[in-house]
Image: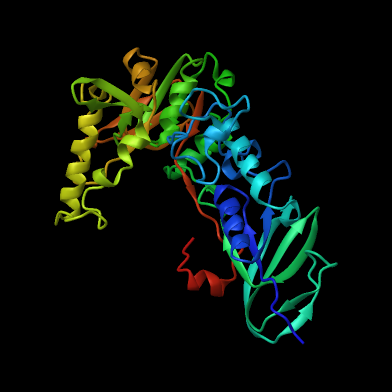
Amino acid sequence: MLVDALREVAVIGAGAAGLSASRHLAKAGMRPILFERTLDGVGGLWNSSSGRTWDTMVPNLSRHTCCFSELPWDEDTSQEATANAFPNRVELQQYLQRYSNRFLEKEWFRMGCTVTRVERLVDIDAEIHKTEIDESNDSVSIGGTKYRLEWTQDDKTHHAVFDGVVITSGFFSEPTFPKLNDSSTANTRTPHIHSSQYSTPEPFTGSTVAIIGSSFSALEIAADVAKCAQKVVHIMPRIPWVLPRLVPVPQTGSSPAFVPIDTAIYRRTRDLGAPNQENPPSLEQEDVNIKKHAFIRSLVGTQKQSILGIPSDDHLPPHVAISDTYLDRVANGKIDVVHGRLIEINHDTLTILATNNETITRNGIDQLISCTGYRPSLDFLSPELQTTLNYDP
């Protein structure tokens, strides 16, 4: 007689999403198998092996919101549980490892494994099979849709069939660089790296460094590099609102209290036009955007922001970056901000198309860092699954 099998689900990626998904799959009576490319622990992009973050990087979320409900930071008695409301990369990776140790089984993990193929198998008959995952465990495979996974480990290819697949490998897969004129490729001799390759400011000591982009990482890396570089040229396509990690919140009859930025912004009462509000206002999206800009302006004012410029595109969703030191370094001249888009590199000279459509240049650039984002990579999915998911690389 056949009995109900413990359904096995492959989870691709052992970052925060992969750990949480595995925890809840297990709670629902399934057996998760986590595939992780790195060998030295969990953590996803917060693992130093990911190359996506640097040791002193601090997220834009505080301990109050950057945590699992089952494992508050307050339970922490280890050395990384400091008074700082915002953990750094090392603390976050250790926190995720602690979550894994408490709620997940070691035998669920397949470390050092790179998934290379996922395909759907339809209408498989019920059969008893052994997988390469655990040859000592016979499992009953229930008829229906299955998924065949291929992966490499130690230069060997393996495969197994699962009842489901959860992809938790995130968006930070393949670094993207700015699109430049064709001549730039032939004329570029200046070292050019992506933000994913950045680790510390010391290698840039005494150099003139160009930072490309308006993202959170662009501002934080620019401020960090400015500690050691002779000069930082920051080419910024769009002006963001630059918010500190602690912002004032008015208190009745007393001085304002300073709270972490995420606790001030991510509130239902501040989510203008949200469908879960009681009597939500009937607003067009453009009106919602204007109100969001006004709310941010009320948090930080415009005096310090004016050092960089006040965002004028109120009809668009606010572009926000979090940094405690960036505006100060712009004010003291360590960072030269150029509003525009990089279009050409010719040896140590950069050509920028400014926001007013004028062409300007910056000379004597020793190194470039592009903070221009990533694209997700789901190339390991079969063409049929990519079509099902409307994936367009």
Percent position (x, y) of residue 244? 35, 26
At horizontal 50% and vertical 35% (from top left) the residue drawn is: 187
Say which quadrant the N terminus sits in: bottom right
> Is 343 situated above or below 28?
above
Q: Nearer the viewer, residue 40 or 94?
A: 94
Q: Nearer the viewer, residue 255 or 231?
A: 255
Percent position (x, y) of residue 169? 57, 53
Can see residue 307?
no
At horizontal 84% and vertical 67% (from top left) the residue drawn is: 135
- In this rendering, would 360 be left or right of 87? left
Can see residue 228?
yes
Percent position (x, y) of residue 247? 31, 26
At horizontal 66% and vertical 45% (from top left) the residue drawn is: 102
> Is 293 situated above or below 166?
above
At horizontal 49% and vertical 31% (from top left) the residue drawn is: 369
Q: In the figure, residue 118 lies in which quadrant?
A: bottom right
Percent position (x, y) of residue 108? 72, 56
